[in-house]
Image: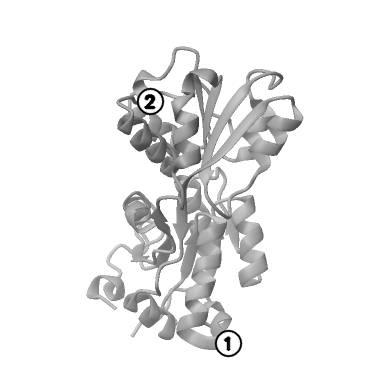
C-alpha cells in the first residue's frame, strides 16, 4: 500500500469522514473520475476497480432507424449518460444533434448525472423524476402516456424493461432500442488483487447490477471457488434498490444503500457503512 494510505494524515477530521479508509469503486473505466473525486474529498484512499467496459451495441441499425424518424416521437427517455452519448454520436452522423432536436420532442432523464450530460450538450431535460430510479420516472411522468410515441435507448443487455412495460401498459407506443453495451473487463487490476489478499479493502461500492455480477465473475477468476471469503470483512455498498438486489443474489448481502441513489448518496452510504468500524492495520 502507498505511504498515503498507511499514514492516514486526515484521520479524525470531521470534514473527511473516510480518512484512512481504502474504498474500491466499480464503475466503467472512463467514468471513474467523478466518483473518485467525491470519495477522495471525503478523505478516502480510492482503489479503481473497473467492472464495466462500455462498447457499441452489436447492431446500430435499430437506433439509427429510430433516430431517422425522431420527428415522429413525443419523448426521448434516457436513463444513463452512456445512452445520451450514444444518441448524440449517432445523430451527429446524420448532421443533427440533441441541441437541435425536433420542436415537438421532449426529453426525460433518469438521474442527475444523465440530466447533467444532456445540459452539457445544450439539451436540458424537460423532466427529471424526484428519485433517480426508473420507477420514479414512471410514477411522476408529467403527462398521460396514452397515445404517446416514446423512444427509449438503453443498454443492450442486462437493463430493466420497467419503463417500456409501464408505458406500454399506459397506452404509449414504445420503441426500445440498444444504444450501447457494457461488457466485463478481462480481469481484476493487480492493485485490487493485492488489497484483497492483504485484507486491506474496507468497502466496495457498486453503481449498477452489472458491476456486481462482473465483479463477482472477476473475483471468482482471481481467487477460485472460495472467492466470497475475500469480501468477508469488506463493507458492500450499493447505489440503489436493483443494485442491492443483485448484491444479495451474487454476494449474499448488502451493508448500505445510497439515498438518494446517486454518487453523493453512495459516498454517504459508505460513510454510514464504515461508521464505528476500526481502521485496518495495513501492511
Q: Using the image, determine if residue 167 lies above or below residue 51.
A: above
Q: Which numbered disc covers residue 98?
A: 2
Left/right placement of residue 231 relative to residue 123 reads: right
Instruction: Find residue 188 and report its image quarter.
Output: bottom left
Residue ID for mark 1: 225
Q: Quadrant of the C terminus?
A: bottom left
User: Reading the chain from its start, which is encountered first: label 2 or label 1?
Assistant: 2
Q: Using the image, determine if residue 202 lies above or below residue 227.
A: above
CB atoms at circles 2 and 1 under 8 Å apart? Answer: no
Horizontal and vertical percent position of residue 76:
52, 27
The answer to whether residue 124 shows anywhere in this view is: yes
Horizontal and vertical percent position of residue 186:
39, 72
Residue at image coords 45%, 65%: 184
Look at the image and name its color scheme.
one colour
Residue at image coords 41%, 66%: 24
Q: Nearer the viewer, residue 171 or 216?
A: 171
Q: Nearer the viewer, residue 222 or 147?
A: 147
Amino acid at each position: 500500500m502507498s505511504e498515503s494510505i498507511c499514514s492516514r494524515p486526515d484521520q479524525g477530521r470531521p470534514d473527511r469522514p473516510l480518512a484512512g479508509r481504502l474504498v474500491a469503486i466499480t464503475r466503467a473505466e472512463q467514468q471513474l473520475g467523478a466518483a473518485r473525486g467525491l470519495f477522495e474529498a471525503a478523505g478516502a484512499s480510492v482503489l479503481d476497480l473497473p467492472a464495466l467496459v462500455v462498447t457499441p451495441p452489436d447492431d446500430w441499425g435499430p437506433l439509427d432507424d429510430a433516430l431517422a424518424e425522431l420527428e415522429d416521437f413525443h419523448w426521448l427517455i434516457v436513463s444513463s449518460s452512456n445512452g445520451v452519448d450514444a444518441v448524440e454520436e449517432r445523430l451527429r452522423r446524420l448532421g443533427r444533434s440533441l441541441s437541435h432536436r425536433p420542436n415537438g420532442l421532449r426529453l426525460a432523464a433518469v438521474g442527475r448525472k444523465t440530466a447533467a450530460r444532456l445540459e452539457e450538450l445544450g439539451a436540458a431535460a424537460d423532466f427529471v423524476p424526484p428519485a433517480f430510479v426508473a420507477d420514479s420516472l414512471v410514477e411522476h411522468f408529467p403527462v398521460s402516456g396514452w397515445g404517446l410515441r416514446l423512444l427509449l435507448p438503453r443498454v443492450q443487455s442486462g437493463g430493466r424493461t420497467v419503463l417500456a412495460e409501464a408505458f406500454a401498459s399506459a397506452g404509449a407506443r414504445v420503441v426500445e432500442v440498444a444504444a450501447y453495451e457494457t461488457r466485463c473487463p478481462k480481469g481484476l487490476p493487480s492493485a485490487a488483487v493485492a488489497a484483497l489478499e492483504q485484507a486491506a479493502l474496507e468497502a466496495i461500492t457498486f453503481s449498477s447490477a452489472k458491476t456486481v455480477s462482473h465483479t463477482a465473475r472477476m473475483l471468482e477468476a482471481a481467487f477460485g471457488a472460495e472467492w466470497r471469503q475475500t469480501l468477508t470483512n469488506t463493507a458492500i455498498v450499493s447505489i440503489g434498490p436493483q443494485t442491492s438486489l443483485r448484491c444479495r443474489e451474487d454476494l449474499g448481502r448488502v451493508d448500505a444503500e445510497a439515498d438518494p441513489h446517486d454518487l453523493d448518496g453512495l459516498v454517504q452510504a459508505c460513510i454510514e457503512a464504515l461508521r464505528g468500524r476500526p481502521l485496518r492495520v495495513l501492511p
